[in-house]
Image (cartoon, rainbow, N blue to C red):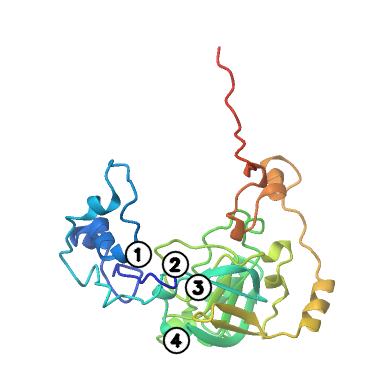
Amino acid sequence: MSREVPVLANIRPNGTSQYLMEDFYYAGGLTALMQRLKPFLRLDARTVSGRTLGEDIESAECFNDDVIRPLANPVYAEGSLAVLRGNLAPDGCVIKPSAMSAKYLKHSGPALVFDDYPSLKKMLDDENADVTEDHVIVLRNTGPKGGPGMPEWGMIPVPQKLIRQGVRDMLRISDCRMSGTSYGACVLHVAPEAFVGGNLALVRTGDRISVDVHARTIHMEVPEDELARRRAARVAPAPRFGRGYGWMFQQHILQADRGCDMDFLQTQFGETAGEPDIF
């Protein structure tokens, strides 16, 4: 669906717009947007109003064509999210192409790898850091188990050194997440995460990483035999918790591609947990 449905809402962080959700509201809001997306909707679907979706949006109007674009003039021709796959993320990762510089939609550069956020932060603040806009910053061990809890560290800032040079975007990769209002060429939710032995754990500074958003691919340009040697030599990180909720979380949390849910909350054949008797 993301390949077919364009981005029409010209609000931050999409595109270069400074429009906010308030502007979206005054331009007609969600019903106006849905009116313009009618070719992609099931208009006969019954809604909570008791009427069909088509009936609900029939009278909707758009009052600002720059805020809610027509189909012929989208903000971005595809959906705002793309799932990439490759040897760096066999189970997928997510990027927001509508909120990034077009320069990085297809990019290859050397990795600059960090195993924790404090190390990354030190580099970001270093005015003499050995980093260029062509580097690919990698932050790992920040996923569902590694974080733990997949914190919002994925919106990795552009290093201060590059900010002073006028650089406003660069490719950044992590197994954590970021806010939906964040922007930039940030690859997120890499699965499997590094903490559990995903290939992200095998990347070394200097390895070349290639991303092609149109082709939906992400690769580290390292021969498979070398990756096998690194995998065999890898030492798994020590467990984070020895007891309590943290221990239970580590045992049962699923990876990003499976929703970061607890495995025991999954059901088969529609089982329910039931309700206790109340006396």
- Residue 188 placement, left or right of 148: left
Sequence-first tag of 1 and 3: 1
Disc assigned to residue 180 = none
Up-down: is 203 above or below 263?
below
| Image quarter of the C terminus | top right
Secondary structure category for the residue under label 3: strand
Secondary structure category for the residue under label 4: helix
Q: Hey, what amino acid is under mark 2?
A: Met
For disc 4, the marked residue is 103
- Distance between the alpha carbons at the discs numbered 1 and 3: 28 Å
Question: Residue 18: image x %, image y %?
Answer: 27, 71
Question: Residue 250: image x %, image y %?
Answer: 70, 50
Question: Residue 120: image x %, image y %?
Answer: 59, 72
Please tell me which residue is depicted at 23% across the width and 69% down the height of the picture: 67
**Circle 4: is it few (<14), some (14-19), or many (20+) Cα within 10 Å?**
few
Up-down: is 93 above or below 102?
above
Q: Quadrant of residue 182?
A: bottom left
For disc 1, the marked residue is 40
For disc 3, the marked residue is 186
| Image quarter of the N terminus | bottom left
- Distance between the alpha carbons at the discs numbered 4 and 3: 13 Å
Disc assigned to residue 1 = 2
Up-down: is 156 above or below 21?
below
- Distance between the alpha carbons at the discs numbered 4 and 1: 29 Å
- Distance between the alpha carbons at the discs numbered 2 and 3: 21 Å
Sequence-first tag of 2 and 3: 2
